[in-house]
Amino acid sequence: MKKIYYGLMLAGALTLCTGCSSSLLDIDNPNEVTNDTYWNKPEDATAGVNACYSFFYKEGTWMRWLSFRYDLTSDEGWSSSPWIELGDWTRFLYNNYNFYEGNNIHWEHFYVGIFRCNQVLSYVPNIEMDETTKNQVLAQASFLRALWYFQVNLLWDKGTMPLEPKDASYIPEDASEQEIWDQIEKDLTFAMQYLPESWDAANLGRATKGAAKALLGKAYMQQHKYDRAKEQLQWLIDKEGSLYGLIANREDNFTDLDENNKEGIFEIQFDDQNKGGTGNDASMAFGFQRTQFYAPSGIGWGDGKARRWLVDEFLKEKRVDGKNDLRLYGSILYRGFSQDFPDQPKKYYGFENADWNDGWGTDPEDCYIRKYNTAYYRDAEDYFARNNYRIMRYADILMNYAECLVETGTNPADAAVYVDKVRERAGLAKLKDSQWKDCLSSKDAFIKRLQMERTLELCFEGWRWADLKRWGLLDSQAGIDELKARDKDFNNFIVGKHRRLPIPRDEVENSTVGGVAHLTQNPNY
């Protein structure tokens, strides 16, 4: 029901071959796929845009390593990996700018994803086909290109910005953060004009109008364009007949039991039916790999852990029924979790009546990321988890909208209505009736409380790094001092440098012609 991507392997292989030149002997190969032989039929357009989606199944994206950048580099998590360099890249210790798993893999996979989108946007307009279908194909490619450029800005604050297919002779040029934001806005404005509000069951997982509006709202927010962001996000919340809402059980958002539900705005469609590698052939894997790296040793690799302060923060407030916040149980595994949640199942993977296994660590700081794990259906992790990854969901948008409201002059008490929807689903009191009621006294107090409400709901979902950047906590020593109190890795953070990654050294060197780098290194690197 949920999978649309089993035709992606062939599509990926085809689009990677386009732009190939003839051989040194100039002999035409009748079997070679070229721009002249490929981009001619409606089926080519569909296969081409499917190949754009296929880059979700690459290690440099949410499938695996991108979570190390967004979850573990933020104050929510940390790395205890025995692979020292892998851990260093979550601790702002960027010594080798070409470290593949920490830097180059993201650049490579984002930009090959962009290349595929550029092919669709350049060649599909010339295909004779139904105009509605054509525009939907182009809109999907525009959305996906914007999504990749969004990640470029989050990681590097700049990049290069090809908007059409380039061959091997292409010399990348600098594109500023603002130039990239401007292009993201253009792509998403186009996309939301032509994307449908929903797809049929055979096409679940494709970009929708709501996904484009949500991502555009987030792009505006990162630029502090809160008026424009509010307009886009309001459509998802207040539109008559809106398709979106909170589901009753929050934890169902992180399993495969209720995927593509009304809370999911854009999801990567993962599955365990193909158990191959991550190439472009018929054995290509579609599994979610993060779970293998976050699960405790003996179950997974134990490379990524949660910060203990999150556990303590969850435990500060009881639900209205006097019990602890179940979001903690669903998000983090820690010593003593079964005492804090005596009514919940104590089985953890293959461990019956589990509380803690000393093989998982003896330090109180040893807390594991439980969100998205697959203990509900198996006893150990691997590289083929079948649960979708929700890039954007409605709870996130509700809190984004509340932030936009107060940033544009709305009384905090009125903005709190949207935060309260998330809190009440978790069984908590409304803010005005809670121990945090003083947060309604001013804009600044409300934003500070919202910063905590967001991480309690959204921890380990990949948005904390974007939030820290937007709130300016990475731009002042006062902000870094606040983060240090929660995460000792921020002792390595240098203001003016570490809010962004270094551009991969190879990319800078390969752009250098006549001693002039057309793609320059980021400041202070």
Image (tube, rainbow, N blue to C red):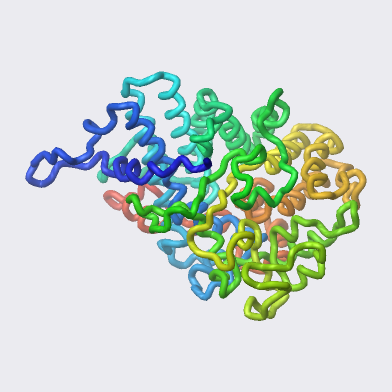
Residue furthest toward the right? 433
Q: Quadrant of residue 192?
A: top right
Q: Is residue 175 above or below residue 196?
A: below
Disc tally is 0
Front one among 402 and 373: 373
Q: Residue at x 90, y 43 (%)?
A: 432
Q: Quadrant of residue 275?
A: bottom left
Q: Is residue 508 visible?
A: no
Where's residue 89, x and y in %?
52, 65
Where's residue 239, x and y in %?
70, 25
Q: Residue at x 41, y 62 (%)?
A: 100
Q: Is residue 366 above or below residue 271?
A: below
Lateral position of residue 480 relative to residue 322, left or right: left
Q: Is residue 154 above or below residue 410?
A: below
Front one among 118 and 339: 339
Where's residue 342, x and y in %?
82, 66
Q: Residue at x 69, y 66 (%)?
A: 333
Where's residue 304, x and y in %?
59, 66
Lateral position of residue 366 relative to residue 316, left or right: left
Q: Residue at x 57, y 52 (%)?
A: 387
